[in-house]
Amino acid sequence: MASYRKYLVERTLTFIISMFFSITIVFLVPRLAPGDPIKTALEQVIVGGGSEIEKTVEEYKRMLGLDKDLATQYIFYIKELFRGNLGYSIMYFPTPVIDIIMRAIPWSIGLLTTTTILSWIIGTFIGAIAGWRGEGSRFFNILAFIALGLYVIPYYIFAVILAYLFGYIIRIFPLSGGYTPGLMPSLNLEFILDVIWHSTLPALSIILSSLGWWFLSMRSMIINVKGEDFILMAEAKGLRKNRILWKYAFRNAILPQVTGLALSLRNVVGGALLTEVIFAYPGVGYLIFTAITNMDYPLIQGAVLFLIFTTCFLNFAIDILYPLVDPRIRYGEE
Amino acid sequence: MLSYNRLERRASTLRRLFTMLFSNRIFTLGFTLFMTIIIISLIGNHLFPQEFVRVGNFLPNQPPNLEGHLLGTDSLGRDITAQLFMAVLNSLQIGLIAAAVGTALGTIVGFMSGYKGGIVDSILRIVIDAFLSIPSLIFLVLIASVVKTVDVWSVAMLLSMFSWANPARQARAQMLSLKERDFVYMARLSGMNSWEIVIKEIMPHIFAWMTANFTNAVLWAILTESGLSIMGVGPQGEITLGMMIYWALKYVALFRGLWWWWMTPVFTLIYLFISLYLMHLGMDEVFNPRLRNKGG
């Protein structure tokens, strides 16, 4: 337990340092950048200009505390962060950034949790069968080759190709958005089906690209386990092949897969930014994209910081919780 | 005489390394695919005049034809073949610079951490872990969106900021296992100082590992550049594979039937990823003998 305590301290330090570093950079970058981002952004929004713009810029700077020196601003910024205040959006002035992010979050989490778990299940089961059949089966060798291809190709490439195939060539899925415009978001069957229909292509792009890895890792785990003595014993006892695979080999090979699943859950918020952009899916990724096009710096800053925080926090939480679940995990490297 | 021998020894280490690599079929295939596209792009880029990629130079939206535009033109009136050659070279440049800086920096930091040990190691390890846990794409999106006028060079520099942590972690582990070996004790006893030991004795041992890591870093950098460009914060004034996809998406090439526009960069990226991954896979097989004769 002493080594776990040391590990816990180290992990906590890492988490605090990465957050501190991120907050500092997110704070500094727009302030050190050439030009006046707020003015440029406001000039885009407000038509007319002249003294009105100057006044708005001044007012906005006062609201953000930008009229004070850097150190005071920094302390103010961190204080506000702890209160959950990420500033105000320019595009949707005066909506607080955090409110806009909170509207987008369920879409991102919903899409990624579903796809991560689905691709994990599919990849693991097919991988187990492929590993059990071994390297003699031609069909499964070709499958392994395809899986390697899927693993190498990034998800946004799939997104582009899928959008073309099923959005333009065969028009069976909608090309953008999270639900049909005009439909009221509510928990009835019609709305849920509409959301699923809109999410199919984005989901497919993520499933395809992560499927390959789950397949390959499960396959090689099963191939390893197959050489173990207890499998030989089970065969000697005359157990049915299927029973040996699912009750013996599978159960022993599944643990690293579960670890992998737990580790991949850290990306559950920010792991599909580009798919969201390509399909105009109303998650955080698309939010950042529209914020960039509209030069809404407070929104970009807030959303980026939010994503960094959730990813680092999930990372931290998984790191400290997992050794408690699986005592075989080593703490650190020593 | 002594230094001559050492040179000789190092040269033969390198030669042996290359012989081993090229006797691996997967590596050779990946390397051939990779070199092919580079050579074609170098020649092509040299042959095509600069005007071919200038906006409004040709009739827009021409499908591929044999009368001058093998891959057609885009909605901005630029020749896509000429763009492709330029994009491959630019993307590759980004990949190579980011990978070189990242691997070099990472190796130095990792070595320092592993070699010194103690408090330096503890601090560096936590910093490395912190960098590894920060989602790099999101971070880079923020910086690039504020800097705005990024070019090929600055994108490469931005990517290097995040490509050093992974090699650093691995270099540290390598150093920890190497520094206790007999030949390092021997060198220390013979009066070499730390840096001499690292460069002359330890470097040759991890050269193989560094090459494999470098390939991986190139792949990562090209992938992230495309990601940044699609998010709209790539090098807007220049042509990279990512920027080609960005413009194609921006002008809705996907749904206007301009398949030649978006397919060119997309399939080139797939080609590049596969060739680089094959090289990496081959290196893994050669350098990690444990992986040989094993499935997966």
Image: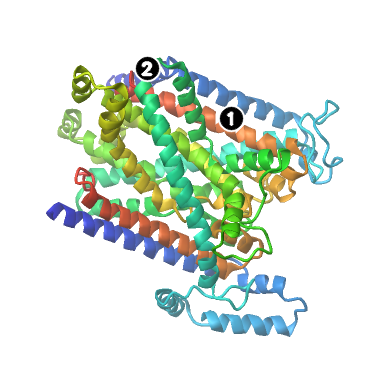
| Within-10-Å neighbours for mark 1: few <14, some 14–19, many 20+ | some
Above/below status of A144 relative to A63: above
Q: In this view, does A80 lie to the left or right of B153?
A: left
From the viewer's perspective, is the residue at label 1 or at label 2 nearer? 1
Q: Position of residue B215 (x, y in %)?
A: 46, 33
Outermost residue, left direction? Answer: A2
Q: Which numbered dot is residue A24?
A: none
Q: What is the C-alpha distance between the residues marked 1 and 2? A: 29 Å
Q: Which of A164 and A78 is in front in this view?
A: A164
Q: Which numbered dot is residue B271?
A: 1
Q: Where is residue B176 in the image (x, y as percent from the top left)?
A: 23, 39
User: Residue B105: which quarter of the image?
Assistant: top left
Circle 2 is placed at which residue position? B16
x 54%, y 33%: residue: B273
Using the image, name the chain to which the residue with label 1 belongs. Answer: B
Q: Is residue A162 left or right of residue B164?
A: right
- Kind of residue indicated by mark 1: Tyr
x 39%, y 35%: residue: A124
User: Residue A156: which quarter of the image?
Assistant: top right
